[in-house]
Image (cartoon, grey):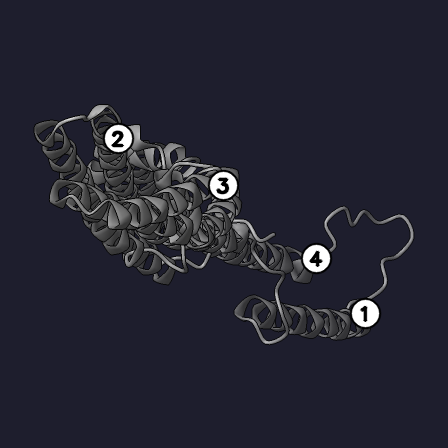
Amino acid sequence: MAGPFDFMHIKGRTAGSSNELSFDVLDAARSDYGKKRKKDKKASKASTPAPSQGSYHGVSGTATLSAAPEVERRKRERRTHSLKLGFVAVIAVVALVGAAGYFGYTYMMGQQNFTGSYDSLINRFRELDKTIVQVDAIMANPYDSGQMEAEANLLDKFPQMTRELNALTAEARSMKELTSVPEDTAALSGVESAATARKDMLSAAEGAFTLSKQVKGVAYQADKVWSSVSEADAKAREATEIANAASTQEETQQARDATVEAYNLFEEALISLQDVGNQTPGTVFDLEISYLKKRVAALDAAIDTEDALLSGDRNTAEAKNETYNDADAEAAMLAARFETSPGRQVREAFQVDMTAWQEKYQDARAEAATADATVRSYL
């Protein structure tokens, strides 16, 4: 992987560079100078007489003496030129190192700024997750009636949380446009995915919480209706006991009044349960509604029986009493088939819809976990 300071490496000279051209000129000068020396030497041999044996020529002569200063002058020029070239090379290297240092510093400062901004994004995620942890716990059992207040409080927070997640996504995208480092881009993509997954989690949780609120409301109504059925049944038993013990017109009238009261209670329960059933899918309360209808029919026959007794019509009283007994027996058979409370039946009726929301939540939760792993790997 390319490092931030790779550009500090000074490349080797290439053909046509200024330094190489300078060396070509120097080589040519040396060649010309060498040819000239050979030419001068031949001329010197031709013009200078060969020394005679026995004479002393420690210093060869004028030509030799005059050549020495010229050699020194040319050496000085070469040294000066070399020093100039070296100085220029040093200046070039210092300039490159300076540029590398500047860009390296800029890169490091940019990375520090990026890391600070990235850490800020993660800290904002941590704050959001404090609430999401509460959502997660409720989603394990959204029908828990003890969580109604907590669900309502969380639902109130969802709009602001969604806005914050949208802001995190937008900021991550802006940061991606300012970086070219692959690792940074991958980390920011992880941030985007983590935010999107959390929004999906909140969306699914909102659906589940809203459904849970509806289901708990309907279940509460159903259980309340069934409580009134128990009250109606108790009143019906009381009326039967009074009727069985009645031996006077007054006692028969008391039995009739109690029977009418029980009839009204059962009829109200029937109408209420039918209304609750209209708020649920399918035919949730068919058995219970059939039972209530039989109880209403039985009590209606009981009222007719008591009216016949009060009027002295024993034949009609016996026929109506038989109708009462048949309807009451059928009601008892239906009651024997009851398996669970109406409230639980409501929750079961909506379970398919609730399961769908829970599955959506779990899918989004898994995506969030994958995205979070990418984010953590960068940290």
Residue receiving disc 3: 337
The secondary structure type at the circle numbered 3 is loop
Q: CA distance from mark 4 to mark 3?
A: 144 Å
| Image marks 3 and 1: residues in contact by CB distance under 8 Å | no
Which mark, by number, is residue 45?
A: 1
Image coordinates of residue 37 in percent, x first then y, are 72, 69
Residue receiving disc 2: 240
Q: Nearer the viewer, mark 4 or mark 2?
A: 2
Please state which amino acid type lies under the numbered disc 1: Lys
Q: Report the front residue among 159 and 17.
A: 159
Q: CA distance from mark 4 to mark 2?
A: 163 Å
Residue 333's place in the image compared with 196, above or below, is: above
The answer to whether residue 368 shows anywhere in this view is yes
| Image marks 3 and 2: residues in contact by CB distance under 8 Å | no
Q: Report the front residue among 372 and 106.
A: 372
Residue receiving disc 4: 61
Q: Residues within 10 Å of mark 1 (few under 14, many from 20)?
A: few
The secondary structure type at the circle numbered 1 is helix
The secondary structure type at the circle numbered 4 is loop
Q: CA distance from mark 3 to mark 2?
A: 24 Å
Image coordinates of residue 310 in percent, x first then y, are 13, 41
Q: Residues within 10 Å of mark 3 (few under 14, many from 20)?
A: few
Q: Nearer the viewer, mark 3 or mark 2?
A: 2
Please state which amino acid type lies under the numbered disc 3: Arg
Q: Nearer the viewer, mark 4 or mark 3?
A: 3
Closer to the chain start, of discs 1 and 4, is: 1
| Image marks 1 and 4: residues in contact by CB distance under 8 Å | no
Closer to the chain start, of discs 3 and 2, is: 2
Q: Which residue does the image show at 76% across and 46% down from the upper left?
A: 58
